[in-house]
Amino acid sequence: MELVCPAGTPAALRAAVDAGAHTIYCGFADETNARNFPGLNFSREEMAAGVAYAHRAGAKLLIAINTFPRAGSEDLWHRAVDDAEAVGADAVILADLGLLAYAAEHRSGLRRHLSVQAAAANPDAIMFYAEAFDVKRVVLPRVLSVEEIAAINRDIDVETEVFVFGGLCVMAEGRCSLSSYATGRSPNMHGVCSPASHVVYGEEQEELVSRLAGFTIHKVAKDAPAPYPTLCKGCFSAGGHTGHVFEDPISLDAAELIPRLAEAGVTALKIEGRQRSRAYVSAVVKSFRRATDAIAAGRPVPVSELAHLTEGQTSTLGAYRKIWR
């Protein structure tokens, strides 16, 4: 299966390619990119150089233009699509209907993938995008079980890509009202979920307390690993009980499920982490490249050795097993 790997900087892109990534995804340094953070992402010149570096190694490069255009500013997003074709990208990853229509009409030779931000989670929705905009691949949201993915693949004629490592979104992808309410920063408009600028840590009565925009999210012992304070994975109190509603605040690691995902008809495995360092990218890509090579050769998938790189130093299979149902 194709291994699709993140790169938030040119250095991370080179690290991903050198570590064995089949495909790298990244974004321009502006609002068109759902990871629009200072110090991350690519100028047009850097993107062109990144495409050339990937292609010399036999890898592909995808450009994520996966936010939703603001009214009156559509030209910024249209230019991003135009420039993606100009720099030689192998595909663009889009979510907005209008932007998909623009790309299909004006840049028909540029391959189109449907972003996870579109939250297309059933065959009817996926085939609509395929028939209306000639979408070739859909990135499935992280709320589907393996069985549901297999059922989708039986009914569509589109490639599917699924997340296997990194941050775990348990909401409708990119549409989190919780983060917007708490911080005023919308995930799918600003590319910011629980922005670091709003996070505060403090010690209270032998506990480390994490707050987001004044809301207390977690309390852990001072010597325990502290998860990143994401609202959907915070602790909530109701009916005299305090606990996590969906998943504990830990990272996704679905390496052990790769054989089942292959049987379910998945085309590509995606690693989350464009905000991560090149060392992180290199280590994760190498580990999952060993796994995909093992699958291709008919060997057992090696045991994951990435716990030290996960949130809270532990991991979950998330919705692939959907324990909250």
Image (spheres, rainbow, N blue to C red):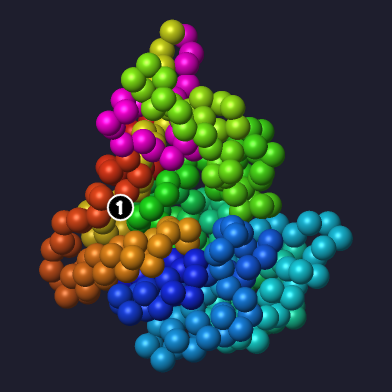
Q: Picture coordinates of residue 254 (x, y %)?
A: 29, 52
Q: Going 23% across and 60% down the picture, which residue do you hit?
A: 259
* Classed neighbour count for the residue bearing mark 1: other residues with Cα under 10 Å, few (<14), some (14–19), many (≥20): some
> Which secondary structure lies at badge 1?
helix
Q: Residue at x 30, y 75 (%)?
A: 19
Residue placed furthest toward the left: 299
Magenta-drawn stretch contains 29: no
Nearest the viewer among 21 and 92 is 21
Q: Looking at the image, is 96 positioned above or below residue 172?
A: below
Image x and y of residue 31, in percent: 69, 61
Task: Answer whether residue 228 is magenta in the image.
Answer: yes
Is 266 left, or right, of 229 in this rendering? left
Q: Toward which corner of the image does residue 165 lie, by quadrant? A: bottom left
Q: Amino acid at mark 1?
A: Leu
Residue picked out by circle 1? 309
Could you tell whether 281 is left or right of 24 in the image? left
The span picked out in magenta is: 219-239
> Picture coordinates of residue 299 (x, y %)?
13, 68
Q: Residue at x 44, y 66 (%)?
A: 6
Looking at the image, the residue that sits furthest to the bottom is 56
Image position of 158 (left or right of 74): left
